[in-house]
Image: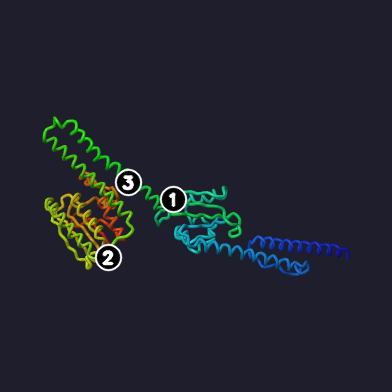
Amino acid sequence: MSWLPWLLLFALVVTAVWCFAEIGGHLRWARRALLADGGAPRPQGWLVRKLRLEELFIAIERRTANESEIRDAAARRIEALLAPLTDAVLVVDAQDRLRLANPAAAALFNLTEEDAGGSIVPLVRSADFIELVRRVRTEGGARSMILLNRAPLSDVWIQAAGARTDPEAFDDGAAIFVLADVTALKRLQAMERDFVTNVSHDLRTPVTILRGYAETLAEDQATMSTEDRARFTQKIVGSVGRLQGLVEGLLALASLESAQDVRREVGALHVAAREVAEEFAARCKAAGVKLELKLEAADGGAADPVQARRLVQNLIDNALSHAAGMSRLLISTRDTPSGVELSVEDDGAGVTPADLPRLFDRFYRTDKSRRAGGSGLGLSIVRQVAELHGGSASAEPAQPKGLRITVTLPASA
């Protein structure tokens, strides 16, 4: 029976190892439960009952559940507060997982409900934004101007600001980011730079000519011939006319951009087309151009009377000034499902494919327009009038040759 003590010792060792293993498992469960990590079932068994651990484990579960409910409630409150905001808001946890995105953020990054909980890196696709996340982690707060490449959607500029957020709602290490779309502001800033550059150039040219000829007249009028004096005077008159046209165009654009609404009158577009065509009749006859009207819109084109005249004037003047070789100019209207369509079509030389997309840009002039002394504002005013009415303007080659400018105005209420 010498083996009996060894058997008892072996049983004792096995029992001790089992007890330690069980206790270790119970401690690991308690740790995970207190840290809200995992959802393993509460330990049960002989050892739990023997050590009276069941009440302790139940208390741990209740505490964990209460803390989870508090965190969820806080997250729901934050989500409800952020939902109406027009700026995009993201919350990223310590593991760079997306915890919250308000509707504006979902639209900005094209997010879906399935993206919640995923890594933020492939969702935003921006190294600059990931760098901003890193700076917020180390500095506690940061801001940056970021260009988001959202292919196939259009790229956008965003002003992003981030800071650490409430750990009770999103755990330690979480950060919140507010992103404002400033693409329109960036575009306006670029337009402002172009505007200043172009205005400075276009104003400088006629002013320089005016000064040169005026100084020459003032200094040499006693010795100048009658023919030279008349020629210099005509140059001054031409430069004043160009300067006046440029200033009037700028004032027209300024008034259109500051306008908030238009006063629509039924038939105003047809009235403007007939009146303006009559005013340009002598100029068309002198240029050898046959001006035709084909007005078929049922209500005569509901539009603001003043803006309708400005629209037609700029369209006809643009054709007469820049359509080289034109012999016929057709002004027509017709009803479309979206409203009334006004077209001005010439049979001139047309424009190159490279010029076509930029015809409505402010101060943009083709080579022929530059030689003709155009200001580059006529078609920009046309587009502005169309957009003020809620419509649009476009250009396309006419067949067999020439250019067709089309303005679409929405149907009147």
Snapshot quadrant of residue 176: bottom right
Residue 219, percent across and down?
19, 31
Query: Which residue type carries mark 2?
Result: Gly
Q: Disc 2 marks which residue?
A: 339
Q: Which mark is residue 147?
A: 1
Answer above or below: position of 101 versus 221.
below
Residue at 59% across, 54% down: 173
Q: Which mark is residue 109?
A: none
Q: Disc 3 marks which residue?
A: 195
Residue 37, percent across and down?
63, 61
N-terminal-most mark, 2 or 1: 1
Work out how far the residue at label 2 is from the one at label 1, CA to CA, in angstroms.
37 Å
Work out how far the residue at label 3 is from the one at label 1, CA to CA, in angstroms.
24 Å
Counting other residues with Cα less than 10 Å from the Cα at mark 1, is it few (<14), some (14-19), or many (20 or more)? Answer: some
Left or right: 151 as drawn, with respect to 62: left
Snapshot quadrant of residue 214: top left
Counting other residues with Cα less than 10 Å from the Cα at mark 2, is it few (<14), some (14-19), or many (20 or more)? Answer: some
Counting other residues with Cα less than 10 Å from the Cα at mark 3, is it few (<14), some (14-19), or many (20 or more)? Answer: some
N-terminal-most mark, 3 or 1: 1
Query: Which residue type carries mark 1?
Result: Leu
Residue at 32% across, 54% down: 257
Please report contact status of discs 3 and 1: CB closer than 8 Å, yes or no: no
